[in-house]
Amino acid sequence: MVENGPLRVSGCSKNDYICNMKAIKNIESKINQLTPSLIGELDRYLDYLINKRIVRKSKRLKQDWAGGLKDINMTSIELQKKALDWRQK
């Protein structure tokens, strides 16, 4: 589990411990009402919320495939038509 610091609730100041604890108790009481399958769904959703905040470093685009079809004696349009035929089969 990733620690993101204390829970901050709208209407609570940054260091309002009592307000944050009330919010946590409220969430816990709601979790206790869930069925096991919904708890699994909640777990996946929490993972999603945590991971969407992580900034991923973009990778440089690789173009090592360039020139890979130079031995094929077809125009690009002929190749597109052939690919369309393959998809329709």
Image (cartoon, rainbow, N blue to C red):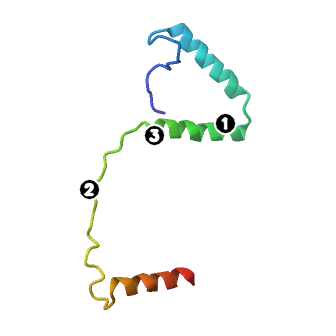
61 relative position to 77: left or right: left
Task: Tell which circle, 3 or 1, labels the residue nearer the N-terminal end.
Answer: 1
Which amino acid type is marked by label 3?
A: Lys
Q: Which residue is mark 2?
A: 60
Task: Tell which circle, 3 or 2, labels the residue nearer the N-terminal end.
Answer: 3
Name the image quarter holding residue 37.
Answer: top right
Task: Tell which circle, 1 or 2, labels the residue nearer the N-terminal end.
Answer: 1
Q: Residues within 10 Å of mark 2 (few under 14, many from 20)?
A: few
Q: Which residue is mark 3?
A: 52
Mark 1 near mark 2, Cβ–Cβ under 8 Å? no
Asked if 61 appears above or below 51 in the picture, the reply is below
> Closer to the observer: label 1 or label 2?
2
The residues bearing labels 3 and 2 have C-alpha atoms spaced at a distance of 21 Å
Name the secondary structure under disc 2.
loop
The residues bearing labels 1 and 2 have C-alpha atoms spaced at a distance of 39 Å
User: Which percent across, then down, holds residue 30?
Assistant: 69, 25
Residue shown at the point (66%, 36%) measured from the top left: 39
The residues bearing labels 3 and 1 have C-alpha atoms spaced at a distance of 20 Å
Which amino acid type is marked by label 1?
A: Ile
User: Which percent across, then down, holds residue 42?
Assistant: 62, 37
